Amino acid sequence: MKFNYVHKVVCFTRPDVRNQDPAGLLSKIERAAESPLKIIKEITGRAEIKRTLKVNIVPWGDLCLHEYQWDLRRIAFSPFRLSRGERIWKFYDAIVRNGVFIPEPVFLLEIKRFLFTTKTYLATRWIDGACSLDHLASAGKIPESGDLQVILLKYVDAIANLHNAGFVHGDLKWSNLLCVSNRDPDIALIDLDALEKTSSVRMLARDFGRFLIPPKHYQLQRETIDLLIERYLGRRGESRLLKRVIGAYVAKKKK
């Protein structure tokens, strides 16, 4: 970690790239954000706080850059809780150790005014050859078949591993589930803004239940849903309460 008292910039980097001057890195980030290789998500409304860009920054190369522009409420609470970027940075190693593939964060940089964080940048390694499960479903490339079940069971195992490690993803919609070609593992969980550490049965059940609700243009057969639930419970340890809460959440969301 380095702290620059003049610019009030806090910077963390992974061990493979050290000695980054915070002010110099911020300058690189701002230049890259002005001319991104690709705009993945832009801020389009007053309630939105996050931009997501594909950028190239030396010495890392292609990165996925998340820029959080905090509103006044979040700024006011920033001294008392971890930001979204800080949670991902802090929990990454524990998640990966438990067999869950998520994009590797390479740096976390936060701009502070006194004790208050006003802006956060989190960069993760760019994943080549990736496509979201939502896109594959909308393109009709994964028909309801044994092949789809194989893919979904891989996600079930990853989610169970995440939960066994004591975390919930917080937004397991299919657009946040990647299929990755030419690598092992060939699936990834992305967009971990709502990542939390918890042992709450209700939160764990709702997290898994969200995964069981496909996009509107796609339907899962009841038999497939039951198979996925049984696989999840088998990896987590049979729990009547967990099963009941999952079922209630899915039934409510399908109405």
Image (cartoon, grey):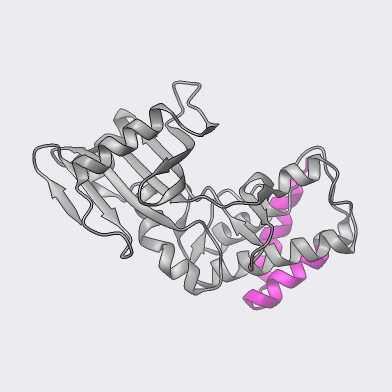
Q: Quadrant of residue 67?
A: top left
Q: Please report the residue visible at 50 percent of the width from the left and 51 percent of the height from the top.
A: 192
- Residue 181 in the image, given as x and y percentages of width and height: 69, 58
Q: Is residue 30 left or right of residue 234?
A: left
Q: Above or below — where is 168 with respect to 85? A: below
Residue 50: percent from the left, percent from the top?
Answer: 44, 34
Q: Which residues lie in the magenta part?
A: 226-255
Q: Residue at x 16, y 42 (%)?
A: 115
Dominant secondary structure of the magenta stretch? helix
Quadrant of the rendering where the C terminus is positioned: top right
Pick whichever, 183 or 124, lies toward us. 183
Residue 213 % position (x, y) = 74, 48
Q: Residue 9 at what x, y percent from top left?
A: 19, 42
In this picture, residue 110 sits left or right of residue 201? left
Which residue: 66% across, 69% down? 157
Viewer-side residue, 118 vs 198: 118
Instruction: Classify 33 as above or below 98.
Output: above
State left or right for residue 153 relative to residue 130. right
Residue 54 visible in the snapshot: yes
